[in-house]
Amino acid sequence: MSKSLPADLSMGSHATGTLDRVGPAVGADLSETNHPAADPREILAALNDTAADYPRDRRAHELIAEQAARTPGAVAVESSGAKLTYAELDDRGNQFAHYLRKRGVGPDVLVGVCLDRTAEMVAALLGVWKAGGAYVPLDPDFPAERLKLYLEDSAAPVVVTQAHLAGRLPAGAAHVVDLDAERDAIGREPTGPLPHSGTPANLAYVISTSGSTGRPNGVAVEHRALVNFLVSMQREPGLTHADVVAAVTTISFDIHHLELWLPLIAGARLAVLRWADAADGVRLAEELDRYGATVLQATPTRWRLLLAAGWAGRPGLRAFCGGEPMPPELAGRLLERVAEVWNLYGPTETTVWSTVHRVERAGGTVPIGHPIANTQVYVLDPHLEQLPAGEVGELYIGGDGLARHYLNRPELTANRFVADPANPGQRLYKTGDLARLRPDGVLECLGRIDHQVKVRGYRIELGEVESALASHPLVAAAVAHVTGDPAELVAYLVPRPGAAPTPEAVRQHARERLPAYMVPGPVVFLESLPMTPNGKVDRKALPAPSRAPAPAAPNRSRVGPRSDAERDLLAIWAEVFGNPNLGVTDDFVDLGGTSLKAAEVVALVSARLGHTIPLGAMYEATTVEKLAVLVQNRLEMGTPSVLVPLQTGGRTPPLFMIAGVGGHVFTFHKFARSLGSDYPVYGLKAVGVDGGRRPPDTFEEIAAEYVREITAARPQGPYLLSGYSIGALVAVEVALQLQALGHEVPLVAVFDMNAPGYPPALPLRRRLAVHARNLFRREGGVRYAVRRLKNLGNRAIRLAGLERLLFPTHPALDALPQDALRDVWVALQTAARRYRPGGKMHGTVALFRAEVPIWNAVVNVDPLLGWQGLTTGRVELHSVAMGHLEVFHPDNIDKLARQMAGSIDRASPAAPTGP
């Protein structure tokens, strides 16, 4: 009969520190726990009285198979719309196990796994276990150099991957199993279980942690330790068949074992979130609601990301928090929004979590609580003597959760897994964490003794970061240090004589060798490193990183936004940093960007622009310029065509939105979401904007390509069209060509553009009078004159057909960020000058006109900007309360979407189909 665990649980906190002396922590406040004096031995005995039964003779996949036999038809795993029942999951795991067994996988054979986050990934991992093997997680988002080290360290003879990820892995002796190419062969394997192979003493997985030598350390964990952990977690914090667990963690971080396997041994439902959804606060909140999640495990950084997105909480959700210190402020905010908050603590070497604590109130240090089942904890002095309650020492952990060893690191294993002096034949793991036992028998974790730290939820050996930094050819010496709250990784570098490395070059060098979470933020250059009298680096003397932006390079000034994406992203950066004078080439880290600011940017990008970017992108694309390219690539490069799906499904015919001179459809994503799920939306990029070819310079050619793409996606009409700025003129020609093919175009929506050929030129005398009045007005006359001269110059260039020849000196083109975009700008301007519509449209024109016009208000006497003369239908006029460039501004977009939805509903009947 298993014994119930105590009701109070917790998780731990890591920070740097040094065990200079033993005694009460400096500034320790124990007043809240002024219990009557108790015998320390009694306190310790009660704390470590954790003996409890668990199935010592079985492994995790066997427990899952037993659950599948009990509830075969229940949903076990779902991800991105795909679902597997318990029976289907078990069958697929068995088939893959048979396939792997034929390739030599058996007990203690390591199998590298590099797969996308899907239900198929869970089945593949399960298959490795069923074959008797142990898996080595390989996150496809990690640098190729890092994955190479993992494979070299593990020497895994088999690697499981997918066709599109195979290029991430180094060529080697391992046999590669491609799930895409070999799917049919795997599907022909039997669904029954394999003959029994292996025991609970065999390895379940090898997961890498950061190593001080510059190479990762593979922690080898046995099935027995994993089963003890899972069964203990099932009791407390507790999980039942009625729960839904949202899995958000990479399988290269050991806490994924709770997310993937705990629900499956309990008969619960596992929802595997895509990385893009898990890394975006708004999307994560939506996914929690969509799946009906009752449990979410996340690091404090991810919880902050969710809160920064304006998450209101879920009343029935239980929040598991671990991997970093839990700040009291965060605990308080979570307590207001969820049913329960649990703080979890544990090193990878003791199998995921070793202590638990239910947080009841915020204030003071959040404890790490008490040990889980069959686990013992000790606060010891340097002589391995137990310290009295209230005194600070090093935390040691013993019990059934200890890993077997560090793979191929016998000296490190002997150093960290030490003999238990009080229990001959038993081992303790030396955590390197400072801790104290409160008089009430609750543990507190107070930081690190060594240079191993926790940053962004991951444990990091500073030596490994320093090794990567020091390998830069222009760096003579490197020190990595953690400072601030939340913790921030800082690089201190001494350049080689005569060398001048840049912060971005150093970070890029690190990105090629380290995961994103290990890449330093601020980079500080020093003439020499401060040293202690005994010749060691004096970390306390390292200067704080400057929060001021890096000085501009010679002859370099602020670079303003040059596209829709850059303009919208720069506005968010300016808000987050409180600096309206930022440019698109200013570096996020040099500006003082932290993980919290990165979370704010990601949340605001999602909330305001409707775009999902992973948190790690802020440490890869560290300028607005680079981030804009990354976002546009993610949004628009998934298809070789110019047609970009923005929102599919719905009840109405789809709306096809044509980009303006910016070429990309970045602006339209948030608008499509604001329209609502009833309205499918597709964007049309400018032809040639991706740089693959020269763009056509007539609307007839451009429209012909658009028509081919539209009719291929949706062979039958009706067709709804729209265009922003110059894209509206292209939409006219698309409508005319569709009509010529016999199709119906009931609506063309125009976003702030005058009709082709409008306005007609005023008589010369009236034009001169207008210019004279504007020139001699009291305010702005000089600016008006300069603007008019520029416009005349640009017009002369266009009329002469010299745009392509003269574009290096053309002021509008100078601001564009790439040659392809310049070519698009030139082509569209040339096409606009030449275009004369060959007929009239027959549908409604919905004109969305900016209240602050870009056009000359004096000559635009027609409020409909000439559109009535271009259609036999009617023109609806809608007012947009900003200027031309702000038509799709976040403050406008909801109203704009409501107006557009009304126009769509009036112009066409509801239809169930879309491309």
Image (cartoon, helix red, strand yellow):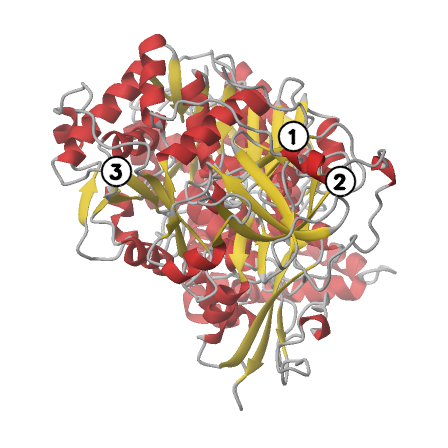
Decide which of 127, 804 is in the foreground and name it. 127
Instruction: Give the secondary structure at mark 2.
Output: loop
Instruction: Give the secondary structure at mark 3.
Output: loop
Q: CA distance from mark 3 to mark 2?
A: 42 Å
Give me the residue at 69% from left, 33% from top. 310
For the residues labelled 3 and 1, say whether their Cβ atoms are less than 8 Å apart: no
Q: Which mark is residue 133?
A: 3
Above or below, 369 against 617 in this view is: above
* Left or right of 40 on screen, residue 37: right
Q: CA distance from mark 3 to mark 1?
A: 33 Å
Can the viewer see residue 800?
Answer: no
Give me the residue at 56% from left, 51% from top. 431
Q: Amino acid at mark 2?
A: Arg
Q: Amino acid at mark 3?
A: Gly
Q: Amino acid at mark 1?
A: Leu
Q: Which mark is residue 438?
A: 2
Tell me if mark 1 has few (under 14), some (14-19) or many (20+) residues whose alpha carbon lies within 10 angstroms of its own. Answer: many
Q: Residue 186: where, in percent of width, then height?
A: 16, 29
Can the viewer see residue 877?
Answer: yes
Q: Residue 277: where, in percent of width, then height?
A: 50, 35
Reading the image, the residue beneath label 1 is: 9
